[in-house]
Image (tube, rainbow, N blue to C red):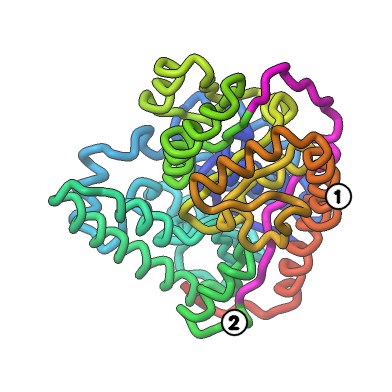
Amino acid sequence: MKILMLTPYLPYPLLSGGQIRTYNLIKKLSRKHDITLFALIKEENERQYIPEIEKYCSQVKVFKRSHRPFTLANIIKTGLSSYPFLVIRNYVKETISAVEAELGQQRYDLIHAETFYMMPHIPTTSVPTILVEQTIEYLGYESFAQNVTIPFIQPLLKLDIAKIKRWEKHYWQNCKKLIVMSEEDKRLIATEINDNDKIEVVSNGVDTAWFAQADKQLPPDPTILSVGTFNWLPNVEAVEFLVHQVWPLIKARLPRARLWIVGNNPSQSILNYQLGDERITVTGRLADIRQAFNGAHVLVAPVLSGKGTRYKILESMASQTPIVATSLAVEGLGARHNVHVLTANTAQQMADATIKLLQDTKLQRKLAKNGRRFVESHYDWEQISRKLDRIYLEFAARPHQKHV
């Protein structure tokens, strides 16, 4: 099949969950399908990574959006538009004409859009569109807004969240097939659009063979790992909860323990954590994320908001790094407490579980072994790509009908 894929990022380097997902799926699906990729970039130097994607795509085109989201132009456009800020900041007018020209010159079987906010770039066309929602955006922003106390910001956030919800629902209803990350997401969206049949679950995955290639190199001090890209609000919320509420409880009982925070784009406030505590280390982008998982005794993931599958959980399991996580962090995975992970939902519970795990090497080995087997059986990219391929092929013999 000939597929036109639209993404709000170039799927390389592998700095975020979205990039990891898209890169691995393109890599696997390119064996059977002819993929053209249209992607947004923030900086011109991102063009250096195009050759890596061209290994798997017949054509790659990029379109530049604003480097910083909160520009005056984006704020004014949002105020004057029915679209939310999330759409405006990812909206590039040239992309629409490029997509229209591409569809006029080539016969495509399918359009694959990653995230609802890429959908406004698709003109009216007879080519069916699959929309992939890696997370339910309005829920993440609702959780963030609850913690904002500045009076004049609250109503603006509520208005923008209402816009996000409106347009998410609109595109859920108008795409031909909707792909989500978990059964929980499917159930929630199905109630919103009153249509269960058009929604398929194609969860995130992990390259288990790649993670198995690296060896453990554990430090002498018990080391707790936190992983997350910090331009995603739930990750910022999680690390703040960990540092301010969980870590003091752990440090009081295990004074030799260390906390290692790893993630792309840490803010200055996150970087400052290590200035006030010599047992905290903050690392930005790592060229090889396996270094983090293989250099820590336990991953702690106090995810408090947001939807979708967390790569940190799958990657930690693939690396045989034991996990302490909130129920939300492992929601929809099928992972079981005290078999694959330890779950805890308060600061005290999380501290207690982490200390227990650090002091019990037998439990560490059990969770590491079970977690590795679990992702090999259920979340390897080879299996995930086969499911998406099956969905693609559903459209192969269908006659095209005009739609937006």
227 is higher (above) or lower (below) than 137: above
For the residues carrying marks 2 and 1, which lies nearer the camera in this image? 1
- Left or right: where 289 falls relative to 371: left
* Quarter of the figure with residue 15: top right
Q: Is residue 216 magenta?
A: yes
107 is higher (above) or lower (below) than 356: below
Residue 103 visible? The answer is no
Which stretch appears magenta?
Answer: 199-223
Residue 364, given in percent of the width and then of the height, sits at 78, 39
Residue 293, given in percent of the width and then of the height, sits at 70, 31
* Quarter of the figure with residue 187: bottom right
Residue 162, given in percent of the width and then of the height, sits at 30, 66
Q: Residues within 10 Å of mark 1 (few under 14, many from 20)?
A: some
Q: Residues within 10 Å of mark 2 (few under 14, many from 20)?
A: some
The kind of secondary structure element at disc 2 is loop
Q: Which residue is mark 1?
A: 373
Residue 212, given in percent of the width and then of the height, sits at 85, 35
Real-space Cα separation, disc 2 to disc 1, in angstroms: 31 Å
The kind of secondary structure element at disc 1 is helix
The furthest residue to the front: 253
What secondary structure is the stretch in magenta mostly built from?
A: loop
Q: Which of the pair 95/134 is nearer the observer?
A: 134
Q: Amino acid at mark 2?
A: Asn
Measuring 70% from the left and 33% from the top, which residue is drawn there?
A: 358
Residue 115 visible? The answer is yes
Q: Which of the pair 403/302 is nearer the observer?
A: 302
Q: Is residue 151 magenta?
A: no
Measuring 63% from the left and 52% from the top, which residue is drawn there?
A: 343
On the rendered image, what quadrant is the N terminus found in? bottom right
Q: Which residue is mark 2?
A: 196
Chain-order first, disc 2 or disc 1: 2
Q: Amino acid at mark 1?
A: Arg
